[in-house]
Structures are given as structure tokens and as C-alpha cells.
């Protein structure tokens, strides 16, 4: 045993039933008092620890010195003595002890009767209090509580084990069921906790009741001890001594007696009070008893509930255990199945591996081979790229060559197509329609109105596009001349047609278009840059000269105009002028002078006769033509002008005679009256022009629709062009248009008219040739005015003229090749 520990042992012979219980209650209450300074949790824990080892009668236990001293400080010394410690005053020498014993003995003998009375009274009071049964019952209660605590502790331990087993099951596949069970367990645990708390409260209440009772008993015991002490202080010997003195000092004895009686009376009162207190205590004890009974009933109820909870817990635990086992079994079975499958797979893989090995070897060799290829690949790729590049260049060159070839072929085909088309046109007798777009010049001014609205197709020279009212209209004609085209280009296109008149064909070329669109420019041109008329004559005369060895050809030229529906001879209307011009030239010349034919010095290869008199017929015609200015054109032709070239010839070998006629017509400009600003005579001019152009349109319409009646006679113009438009002639229309925005309406009208004209089929043209070799004769020239009077403008040759007359004829453009002379037109 440690020196700091002391054996607290209560010998059996010293055990007095009542005292032992008091001591036990005291110790417990002190311990509770001691624990009050701690936290409630700790207090409960300490209390619990203490109660796990309850005290029983005759039981000994050890505690540390500090604990014992603490108990000593707070416990009643009387009971400490009972525990075994002796009071200090008893720890003295033997004589002293004997002297003191005798003294005390003597004093005790004096007060013994009183003491015995008091003791009897006390015993009676104690028996009346009946505390022994209560304390016994209380002890039983406490013991029962301790047992319950032990059971609770056991339950908690079981719960702990359950929790552990639950946490062991968390890894299994039935975590859901486990979670449910865990929830149930948690609920049960909570319920158990609540009940435990309730039980703790009950115990607390019981403790409070016990403490209250103990305190009251302490108070009573103290008072009893006080009474004992008071009795002890009354020595018997001194009483005897005093009794002796009563006889001597009677008043004093009387006083003492009175005091004693008073005291006795006081004590009896005290006893009455004590009895009353004891009755109260008894009442309180009965209350405590009832409370204890209630508490006992509650404890029993909680016990039953605890039992039930324990049963539920056990069931839950068993169910969980079963589920766990089942889950383990299932998992085991599943694992075994999976294991089997894995084994099978493994065998398959093993087999595959065995079969793959040869393929792997092949693959490895292939891989090495490929690696080598990859190493060489950049070089190979570069070579391949270079090779491909070369091939591509070669292919591109070949494609380019092919393209050029194709282009060449295409162009050739286009020309052929054109030729075929022209031939078709010729065979069908269609009117060929050419279009010329004039350039914009300075006189046209500037601004939006002069904006170009015409565009062309670079690949197809037969179409043009007109932008009109936000849309583009396409027109297809036989050929379109762009503004940059020069007179030579135009003439080149028509020269074959012109020369065909020498072969006996009638040819008609007429220029159509609005005022100022360039008709006169195309047909007449300027002296520096002549148009179709002059170039045609030059060509014809050149042809005549070339064919002079085989042919006897005669060319006559006339110029006329239709002005206000009247046909006028532009050469004959002012013959005096011609006379004057001719005579002036003749007077200055020797008529017998011999003339020679020479090559033209201009390098054109044409023949000419130096010194031959030349008369500018065109100049004369131009002078005589009716012109005026309009708002549109400052020198507008107010009439339709006609240059009529007749070519008749006889083949000197075969005697074939041909007659051809070339009509070159410069129509007056179509115009809107309002726009031209015409008034008075000018208005009449415009109206006549429009009327004749309208008649031309009607004729074209009738021809196009192949009507039986063609209204040629509705105007002088159509009447005059009847030959050219009725199938006996190769006809070509030159439609002139302006490219400017301000003329767009007229341009569209002209082009629409041109398209209509283009679709007219006049039928196959007949060549006028017959064999008259035996009946060769001279031709006479009819005056143009005579011809027009007959309704047909026919120029003929008259034979047997005087020299002067011949010269007059030559002045009018006639050439007699039979005489071996050639006259070039005066250009
Ligand atoms: N292709 C061209 N190149 C250069 N100038 C041209 C061209 N066509 C026409 N012109 C000029 O346009 C103006 C009008 O031409 P032109 O007199 O020939 O028209 P027009 O159609 O005969 O008119 P009108 O019917 O009123 O007589 C002239 O000054 C002419 O020189």
C-alpha cells in the first residue's frame, strides 16, 4: 500500500446499522459536493466511475491521501472516529488518561440518569423518525440505479461493437442496406441517449432529495449532539455538591432549581419543537417515499424500454449480420464468376499472343522496311514533286498550245460560220443589218446625259448591249462597229456587196438612224475621210478599169433627194452650175490633147488619167441637198439622199450583158418633233420625214410577215426603194446609233427596227445577165428627172453624143470603156 493511501476499513463489530448508513450517505454526498466544482460532463463521469464501485456494508476501499484529507475536512468528526481515526485528546499518557477517566467517570455518574433519560427520549424520537427503513429503501434504489447504469454501459459497449461491425461492412456492395441499418442504429442510439438523460435527471432528482434529507438529518443530529454535549457538561458530582448546599444556601438552591426547572422547561419545549420537526420530517420522508416509488416505476418503465431497444438493436444487428453474410456470399460468387471469365479471357489472350507472334515478326520487318522508306521519303518526295512540277509545266504548256489552237480554230470557225451565215442570208435574201455606234465628240458636251450606255461583247462582234431604265437589253445584228471603227472598216465590210453590182446584181445600202447619229458621216464622209459613196465609186471605177480587157462596162451616176415627198435631181436641178464648172475646165483645156492611162502615184495600184477634167459631183450634190440645223444636229439633212450608180456591161468574149444598180441611200434622220424644236416649214419637213420612215417601217413589217400586198407606194421613199426591197436586190441596212444616255430611247427604237429589218426575207437575188452578143448596141442615158417621172429611177446611156455632150456625160460620172478611155471619179 502506498504511504499516501490509507486503508479505510470499518470493523464489523463497530458497525451500527444506523451509523453505517449515515457514514455512507455522508461520504457520497461529500463526493458529490467535491464533484460540483467540475464540469457537468466530468461530474457525470466521476459520478459514474464512483458508482461502478458502490459501497456495501463491511467493504473496504482505498483512496489517496488528498482524497482522504478532503473527506476529513468535510465529514463529521464523529463518523470519522467510526471510520477509525482517534480524537487527538485521547492520544495522551496513562496517568493523565486515568485521572481524566475518573473525573469523567464521576461526572458521568452524576449526569447518567439524565443522560439515560435523554437517550431514552432520543431513542424514542429516532424510532419515531423511522429513518432506518427510508435509508434502507434509498440504498436499494441507489443499488438498483447502479445496476441500471451497468446495464446501460453494457448496451453502449454492444452499440460500440455494432458500430464497428457496421463500419467493417461499409466496403461491401450492400452499402445501401447498411446505411439503412446505420440510420436505424443511430435512431435507437438517440432514443437511448434521451432515455439515459432522463434517467440521469431522475437520479439527479433522487440525489437532490437524498441530499435534502441528509442535510435535515445532519441538522437534527447536530442538535442531538448539542443536547448530548449539554448533558455531558452537567457533572454528577457537582450536582450532588449543590444538593448538599441547598440545605445551607436555600435561596441559591432555589434559584438554581428554578434555573434548572427553567432549563428543563426549555428542554421540554425543545423536545416539543423537535417532535414537531420530527413529524414534519416524517411527512417529508413519506413524500420522498412516494417520489421514490414513482421514480422506481419510471425506472422500471425505462428498463422495459431499454430491454425492448436492446432487443431491437439485437435484431437489427442480426439482420445486418445476415445481410452482410449474404452480401459477402454474393460478392464471393460474383468474384468467382468474374475470376472464371478473366481466366477464360486470359487463355484467349494467351492463344492470341501465340498466334500474333508470327504476325508481329512480319510487322516488325515491315516496320523496319517502312522506316527505311520514311528515311528516304523526303528525297523521293522532292524528286516526285520536281517531276510533277515538270509534268504540270509541260501539261500547262500543252494546254496553252491547245487553247491557242482551239482559239485559232474557234476564230476560223466563227469566220466560216459568218461566211455561211452571210451565204445563208444571201440565199434567203435577208436584209443584212450592220450597226455603227458613233463616238461622243466635243459638240455633244459633257455631263450625265453624255454618259455611255452601250457596251459590246469582245467575243461576238454581232451583239451589243444597251443599258436602259435599269436593265440591259441585248441586240443581235449581223455586225456591230464600235465607236473606234473607221470608214475603211465599214467599207471593207460592204465592198464585196458593192462590186456585185458589176456582176449584174441590184444592190441597195441605206443608212438609218436618228438625227445626228452619223448616217451622213458613214455614207458621204468628209473630203479627207470619205464614206461609202465615194469609196464605192472609186472601187467600181477601179474594177471597171481592171476588167476592161474582157468587159465593156458603163457606169452612170445620179444623185437625187426626196424632200417633202418630192423627188429632186441633185445634179440636174442646177445644171447651170454643172455647165459652168465644165465649161470653165474645158476652156482651159486643149480638146485634142492625147491622154494616157497611168498608175496612181498614191501607191494604191489604181489607174488614173493625168489631165482629165474632173467634176466633183458629190460636192455639187452636197451643195444642192436640203439641209438645215436642228436642236440635235447643227447641220441636219432634211431629205433622203440617193446616190444611184448603174453599171451595165457586155462581156467582149461571151457577149453576156449584165445590168446592175447600186443604190446608196442616206435617209433623213428620224426624230421626235418636240425634241428637234421644229416649227413652221421645219415642222413640215420633220413630219414628212417621219411619215416616209413610217411607210418604210410598214413595208418592212409587211415583207417580214410575207403579206401579199406590200405598201411600197405609200411614200416616195418606199416607192423608190421598191426594187431594192422586193427581192431583186441585195440589201444592206446600216443602222446608226448614238452611245449617249440622252439618245437612249431613239437608240433602242432604231435597234428594234433594225432587228425587225434583219428578219425580213426577200428571197434569192436574181442576177441580171443575158447573152446579147449579136445585138450589141449603145445605151442611152435618160435624164434622172425623166426616170423619176416614170416612177422608176433609171439611168441609161445614149449613144451618138457630141464631144461636148460626151463631156457632159463624163461630168455626170459616165465612162465609156469601149472607147478605151477610163474616167476616175472626181473624189
Ligand atoms: N463615226 C464617226 N466618227 C466621227 N464623227 C462622227 C461619226 N459619226 C458621226 N460623226 C459626227 O457626228 C455629227 C453628226 O453626224 P451626221 O451629220 O453624219 O449625222 P446624221 O445622222 O447624218 O444626222 P442627220 O440625220 O441630222 O443628217 C457630225 O459632226 C459628224 O462628223
Image (cartoon, rainbow, N blue to C red):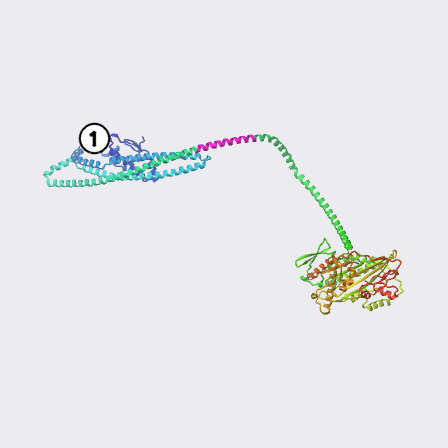
Where on the picture, by quarter, is residue 794? Answer: bottom right
- Is residue 196 shown left or right of residue 605? left
Examine the structure image and report whether residue 328 is included in the region drawn in magenta.
yes
| Relative image position of residue 637 (x, y in whole percent) | 75, 65
Examine the structure image and report whether residue 250 is included in the region drawn in magenta.
no
| Relative image position of residue 143 (x, y in whole percent) | 30, 34
* Along the viewing direction, whichever of 227 and 92 lies nearer the viewer: 227
- Is residue 245 shown left or right of residue 437? left
Q: Is residue 555 visible?
A: yes
* Along the viewing direction, whichever of 284 and 678 lies nearer the viewer: 678
Reply above or below: 344 against 655.
above
Quadrant hosting ligand 1: bottom right
**Secondary structure type for disc 1:** helix
Q: Magenta segment range?
A: 323-349
- In which quadrant is the C terminus drawn? bottom right
The residue indicated by pointer 1 is: 94
Please name the residue shown 89% across and 58% down the image: 774
Would you call the spot at circle 1 few (<14 residues within 10 Å), some (14-19), or many (20 or more)? few
Q: How many marks?
A: 1
Reply above or below: 351 against 417.
above
| Relative image position of residue 543 (x, y in whole percent) | 83, 58
Amino acid at each position: 500500500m502506498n504511504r499516501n493511501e490509507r486503508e479505510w476499513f470499518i470493523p464489523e463489530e463497530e458497525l451500527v446499522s444506523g451509523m453505517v448508513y449515515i457514514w455512507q450517505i455522508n461520504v457520497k454526498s461529500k463526493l458529490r459536493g467535491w464533484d460540483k466544482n467540475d464540469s457537468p460532463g466530468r461530474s457525470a463521469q466521476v459520478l459514474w466511475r464512483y458508482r461502478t464501485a458502490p459501497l456495501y456494508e463491511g467493504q473496504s476501499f482505498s483512496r489517496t491521501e488528498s482524497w482522504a484529507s478532503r473527506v476529513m475536512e468535510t465529514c463529521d468528526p464523529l463518523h470519522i472516529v467510526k471510520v477509525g481515526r482517534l480524537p487527538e485528546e485521547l492520544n495522551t499518557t496513562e496517568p493523565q488518561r486515568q485521572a481524566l477517566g475518573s473525573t469523567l467517570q464521576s461526572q458521568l455518574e452524576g449526569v447518567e440518569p439524565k443522560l439515560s433519560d435523554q437517550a431514552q427520549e432520543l431513542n424514542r424520537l429516532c424510532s419515531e423518525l423511522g429513518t432506518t427503513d427510508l435509508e434502507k429503501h434509498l440504498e436499494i434504489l441507489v443499488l438498483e440505479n447502479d445496476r441500471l447504469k451497468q446495464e446501460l454501459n453494457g448496451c453502449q459497449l454492444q452499440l460500440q461493437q455494432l458500430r464497428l461491425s457496421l463500419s467493417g461492412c461499409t466496403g461491401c456492395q450492400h452499402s445501401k442496406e447498411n446505411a439503412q441499418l446505420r440510420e436505424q442504429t443511430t435512431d435507437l442510439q438517440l432514443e437511448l441517449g434521451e432515455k439515459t438523460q432522463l434517467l440521469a435527471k431522475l437520479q439527479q432528482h433522487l440525489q437532490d432529495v437524498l441530499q435534502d434529507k441528509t442535510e435535515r438529518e445532519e441538522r437534527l443530529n447536530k442538535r442531538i449532539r448539542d443536547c448530548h454535549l449539554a448533558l455531558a457538561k452537567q457533572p454528577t458530582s457537582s450536582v450532588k455538591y449543590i444538593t448538599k448546599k441547598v440545605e445551607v444556601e436555600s435561596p441559591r438552591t432555589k434559584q438554581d432549581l428554578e434555573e434548572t426547572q427553567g432549563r428543563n422547561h426549555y428542554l421540554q419545549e425543545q423536545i416539543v419543537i423537535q417532535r414537531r420537526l420530527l413529524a414534519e420530517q416524517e411527512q417529508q420522508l413519506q413524500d420522498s417515499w412516494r417520489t421514490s416509488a414513482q421514480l422506481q416505476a419510471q425506472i422500471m418503465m425505462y428498463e422495459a424500454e431499454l430491454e425492448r431497444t436492446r432487443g431491437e438493436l439485437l435484431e437489427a444487428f442480426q439482420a445486418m449480420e445476415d445481410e452482410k453474410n449474404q452480401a459477402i456470399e454474393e460478392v464471393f460468387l460474383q468474384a468467382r464468376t468474374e475470376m472464371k471469365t478473366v481466366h477464360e479471357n486470359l487463355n484467349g489472350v494467351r492463344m492470341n499472343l501465340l498466334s500474333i507472334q508470327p504476325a508481329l515478326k512480319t510487322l516488325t520487318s515491315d516496320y523496319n522496311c517502312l522506316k527505311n522508306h520514311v528515311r528516304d521519303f523526303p528525297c523521293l518526295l522532292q524528286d516526285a514533286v520536281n517531276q510533277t512540277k515538270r509534268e504540270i509545266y509541260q501539261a500547262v504548256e500543252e494546254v496553252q498550245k491547245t487553247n491557242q489552237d482551239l482559239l485559232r480554230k474557234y476564230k476560223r470557225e466563227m469566220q466560216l460560220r459568218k461566211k455561211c451565215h452571210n451565204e445563208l442570208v444571201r440565199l434567203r435574201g435577208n436584209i443584212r443589218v450592220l450597226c455603227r455606234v458613233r463616238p461622243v465628240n466635243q459638240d455633244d458636251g459633257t455631263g450625265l446625259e453624255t454618259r455611255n450606255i452601250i457596251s459590246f461583247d469582245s467575243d461576238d462582234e454581232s451583239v451589243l448591249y444597251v443599258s436602259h431604265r435599269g436593265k440591259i437589253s441585248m441586240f443581235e445584228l449581223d455586225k456591230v462597229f464600235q465607236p473606234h471603227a473607221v470608214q475603211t472598216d465599214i467599207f471593207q465590210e460592204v465592198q464585196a456587196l458593192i462590186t456585185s453590182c458589176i456582176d449584174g446584181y441590184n444592190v441597195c445600202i441605206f443608212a438609218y438612224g436618228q438625227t445626228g447619229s452619223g448616217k451622213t458621216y458613214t455614207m458621204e464622209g468628209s473630203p479627207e475621210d470619205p464614206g461609202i459613196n465615194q469609196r464605192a465609186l472609186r472601187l467600181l471605177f477601179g474594177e471597171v478599169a481592171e476588167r476592161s480587157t474582157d468587159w465593156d462596162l458603163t457606169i452612170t451616176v445620179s444623185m437625187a433627194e426626196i424632200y417633202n415627198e418630192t423627188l429632186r435631181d441633185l445634179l440636174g436641178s442646177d445644171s447651170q452650175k454643172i455647165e459652168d464648172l465644165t465649161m470653165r475646165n474645158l476652156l482651159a483645156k486643149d480638146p485634142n490633147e492625147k491622154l494616157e492611162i497611168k498608175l496612181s502615184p498614191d501607191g494604191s495600184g489604181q489607174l488614173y488619167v493625168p489631165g482629165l477634167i474632173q467634176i466633183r459631183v458629190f460636192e455639187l450634190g452636197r451643195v444642192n441637198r436640203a439641209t438645215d440645223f436642228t436642236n440635235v444636229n447643227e447641220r441636219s439633212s432634211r431629205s433622203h439622199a440617193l446616190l444611184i450608180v448603174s453599171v451595165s456591161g457586155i462581156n467582149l468574149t461571151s457577149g453576156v450583158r449584165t445590168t446592175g444598180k447600186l443604190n446608196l441611200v442616206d435617209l433623213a434622220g428620224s426624230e421626235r418633233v418636240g425634241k428637234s424644236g421644229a416649227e413652221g416649214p421645219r415642222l413640215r419637213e420633220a413630219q414628212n420625214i417621219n411619215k416616209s420612215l413610217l411607210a418604210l417601217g410598214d413595208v418592212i413589217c409587211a415583207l417580214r410577215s410575207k403579206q401579199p400586198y406590200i405598201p411600197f407606194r405609200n411614200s416616195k421613199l418606199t416607192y423608190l426603194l421598191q426594187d431594192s426591197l422586193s427581192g431583186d436586190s441585195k440589201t444592206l441596212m446600216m443602222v446608226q446609233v448614238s452611245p449617249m444616255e440622252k439618245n437612249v430611247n431613239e437608240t433602242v427604237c432604231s435597234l428594234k427596227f433594225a432587228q425587225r429589218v434583219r428578219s425580213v426575207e426577200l428571197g434569192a437575188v436574181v442576177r441580171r445577165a443575158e447573152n446579147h452578143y449579136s445585138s450589141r448596141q449603145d445605151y442611152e442615158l435618160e435624164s434622172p428627172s425623166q426616170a423619176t417621172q416614170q416612177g422608176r429611177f433609171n439611168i441609161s446611156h445614149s449613144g451618138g453624143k457630141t464631144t461636148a455632150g460626151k463631156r457632159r456625160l463624163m461630168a455626170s460620172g459616165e465612162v465609156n470603156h469601149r472607147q478605151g478611155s477610163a474616167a476616175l471619179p472626181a473624189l
